[in-house]
Amino acid sequence: MKFFIDTADLDQIKKAQDLGVLDGVTTNPSIMAKVGITGKDQIHAHYKAICDIVDGDVSAEVLSVDYDGIIKEGEELAKIDNQITVKVPMIYDGVKAIKYLSSKGIKTNCTLVFSPGQALLAAKAGATYVSPFLGRLDDISTEGLNLIEDIRTIYDNYGYTTEILAASIRSPMHIINCAKIGADVITSPLASIINLLKHPLTDSGLAQFIEDAKKL
Ligand code: G3P
């Protein structure tokens, strides 16, 4: 299972990379706005800075919602670095654009996916990744994990190679449950990844070992 971090904060990305378990980064317009990045040149420079920190794929989202605009932006983003994956929303023009960009060998991430049908369309269009948003489904009293399970079944039924990138992860349990279901990738805040390593029995066990080590 690949671990992506869902942030544009360079310090957090460096920290995750330093832990040695980071496989990529995802961003979206809200995430970019949070770190105060504005203007095309600054945005592109920031994506380049992220690519220079991590070894894996970096999702950069288009801001256009029309076919021509998505293609133009997608091709520009893809030129920044070969790690760039063009993130495209699950809309009519988005599906068309994913089909085109995939045919040109540009990696794509179909985002804002909330149903198995949307995920099926993304795979048929040739998306590299599909991003179902778990947490946002949970937010509206719908079991987000069921969507991951449904997509896994559909993709396995037909051997689609589109990777399931579970997004909108809010907790370590989301990560564990995605791993049980067989999501290919999770993208998560750093805290949820770090919290995976915590267990009180590890802490008390280590405290005892340190204490006993003094007798050696
Ligand atoms: O990158 C998309 C997704 O991870 C957003 O998460 O927490 O805003 O629902 P969230």
Image (cartoon, helix red, strand yellow):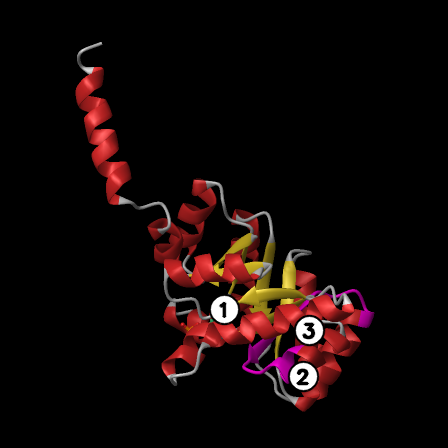
Label 2 vs label 1, nearer the camera: 1
Residue toward you, 176 or 188: 176
Q: CA distance from mark 2 to mark 1?
A: 18 Å
Residue toward you, 204 or 114: 204
Type of the residue with mark 1 = Ala
Residue toward you, 91 or 114: 114
Type of the residue with mark 3 = Ile
Quarter of the rendered structure image containing ligand 1: bottom left
Q: CA distance from mark 3 to mark 2?
A: 21 Å
The reply to whether dot 3 and dot 2 touch (C-beta < 8 Å) is no
Q: Is residue 6 visible?
A: no
Q: Is residue 62 magenta?
A: no
Q: Is residue 112 magenta?
A: yes
Q: Is residue 196 visible?
A: yes
Residue at 44% x, 52% y: name it: 13
Of marks 3 and 1, which one's residue comes earlier in the chain?
3
Q: Is residue 213 left or right of residue 37?
A: left
Of marks 3 and 2, which one's residue comes earlier in the chain?
2
Of marks 2 and 1, which one's residue comes earlier in the chain?
2
The percent coordinates of residue 109 (x first, y second) are 63, 70
Label 3 vs label 2, nearer the camera: 3
The reply to whether dot 2 and dot 1 touch (C-beta < 8 Å) is no
Q: Label 1 belongs to which residue?
A: 167
Residue at mark 1: C-beta within 8 A of ligand 1: yes
Q: Which residues are magenta?
A: 103-119
Type of the residue with mark 2 = Gly
Q: Label 2 belongs to which residue?
A: 94
Q: Label 3 belongs to which residue?
A: 154
